[in-house]
């Protein structure tokens, strides 16, 4: 099912009175877009061995790393998890001194790893 079909189906099932798209409110459209995002996210078929997967993983880790709302122990727990650090392997020096230093060391090494993988694959 395509995203467009999903959105149309979502609107028709949840608001059958809106068969004419000119009457769709901002809230209805937003709800449909959120539902389609969740649909796409759950049906993401990116190959975990691809450079695109590495980029996606790095972006997730980077957003956590740069977050102003999270403290260093939260960043540590999110980055050193099954969803991020255990999905990628590269060697790096782990200072094992503080959450901040451990996370920073991992992120610096991850960035170098991505740059090297891009160079080797010709990905720009």
Image (cartoon, grey):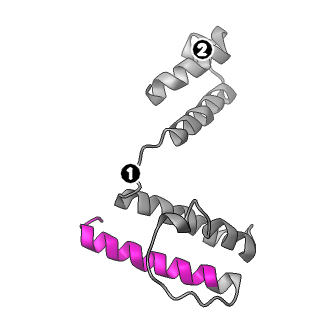
Which residue is denoted by mark 1 in the rendering? 47
Residue 53: give x, y in percent of width and height.
42, 57
Residue 77: give x, y in percent of width and height.
69, 69
Of the residues tagged 1 and 2, which is closer to the observer?
1
| Residue 11 to residue 17: above or below | below
Q: Label for residue 83? A: none
| Residue 54 to residue 14: above or below | below
Q: Label for residue 12? A: 2
Task: Determine whether the residue tagged by mark 1 lies in a helix, strand or loop.
Answer: loop
Task: Determine whether the residue tagged by mark 2 lies in a helix, strand or loop.
Answer: helix
Q: Toward the viewer: 96 or 123?
A: 96
Residue 109: give x, y in percent of width and height.
47, 81
Q: Magenta region: which residues?
A: 102-124
| Residue found at x 49% / y 61% | 57
| Residue found at x 74% / y 67% | 69
Q: Residues within 10 Å of mark 2 (few under 14, many from 20)?
A: some
């Amino acid at each position: 099912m395509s995203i467009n079909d999903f959105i149309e189906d979502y609107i028709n099932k949840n608001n059958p009175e809106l068969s004419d798209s000119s009457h769709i409110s901002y809230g209805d459209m937003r709800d449909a877009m959120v539902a389609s995002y969740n649909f796409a996210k759950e049906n993401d078929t990116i190959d975990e061995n691809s450079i695109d997967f590495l980029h996606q993983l790095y972006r997730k880790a980077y957003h956590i790393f740069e977050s102003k709302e999270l403290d260093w122990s939260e960043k540590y727990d999110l980055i050193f998890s099954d969803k991020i650090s255990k999905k990628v392997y590269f060697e790096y020096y782990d200072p094992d001194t503080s959450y901040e230093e451990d996370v920073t060391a991992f992120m610096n090494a991850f960035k170098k790893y991505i740059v090297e993988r891009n160079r080797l694959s010709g990905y720009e």
